[in-house]
Amino acid sequence: IRQIIDEVQFKPAKCKYRVYIIDEVHMLTTEAFNALLKTLEEPPEHVIFILAITEVHKLPQTILSRCQRFDFHRIPPRAIADRLLYVANQEGVTLSDSAAMLAASVADGALRDALSLLDRCIAISSEI
């Protein structure tokens, strides 16, 4: 976090914004949150922070109140299955609809997890 705070003062050389994505931000220490607070209160115009979190109740109110919140929802299984079928087709792999739906259900709304599962299945067989 301290490195980020030191870097935000510099404008990006080629882009309009310098974007920082901090994943699982609820895992930061109290000291890290305190260090980030001032920068979030008055961020430079050329800086965008994206704080990703799965447990919003663990985020200090002082941080939450300085952020614009966007809630993302799980992807429906049918949409994931359709994407898996598309990827399998692009890779020349035979994937049945029932296998795609099973992988989508196991992934519980997370496309990345479903794609990872598909990748592991493809490593074993080209017909799933």
Image (tube, rainbow, N blue to C red):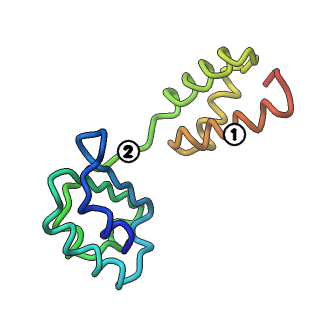
Looking at the rendering, in which quadrant would you find the N terminus? bottom left
Residue 103 place in picture, x, y as percent? 65, 36
Q: Are circles 2 and 1 on residues that touch, CB within 8 Å?
A: no
Query: What kind of residue is marked 2?
Result: His
Query: What kind of residue is marked 1?
Result: Leu
Residue identifier under label 2:
73
Residue that extends furthest to the bottom in the rendered view of this protein: 31
CA distance separating discs 2 and 1:
20 Å
Q: Which residue is rendered at x = 71% and y = 20% of the image?
A: 96
Circle 1 packing at 10 Å, graded few (<14), some (14-19), many (20+), is some
Q: Is residue 29 left or right of residue 78?
A: left
In this view, 23 is above or below 123: below
Kindly state the secondary structure of the residue where label 2 is placed. Answer: loop
Q: Is residue 121 left or right of residue 69?
A: right
Q: Which residue is rendered at x = 70% and y = 19% of the image?
A: 91
The disc placed on residue 101 is none
Q: Nearer the viewer, mark 2 or mark 1?
A: 1
**Numbered circles on residues, count:** 2
Residue 110 place in picture, x, y as percent? 52, 43
Kindly state the secondary structure of the residue where label 1 is placed. Answer: helix
The disc placed on residue 117 is 1
Residue 74 lies in what quarter of the image?
top left
Residue 111 lies in what quarter of the image?
top right
In this view, 71 is above or below 77: below
Q: Which residue is rendered at x = 32% and y = 50% of the image?
A: 19
Comparing 120 with 9, the one in front is 9
Residue 12 place in picture, x, y as percent? 29, 48
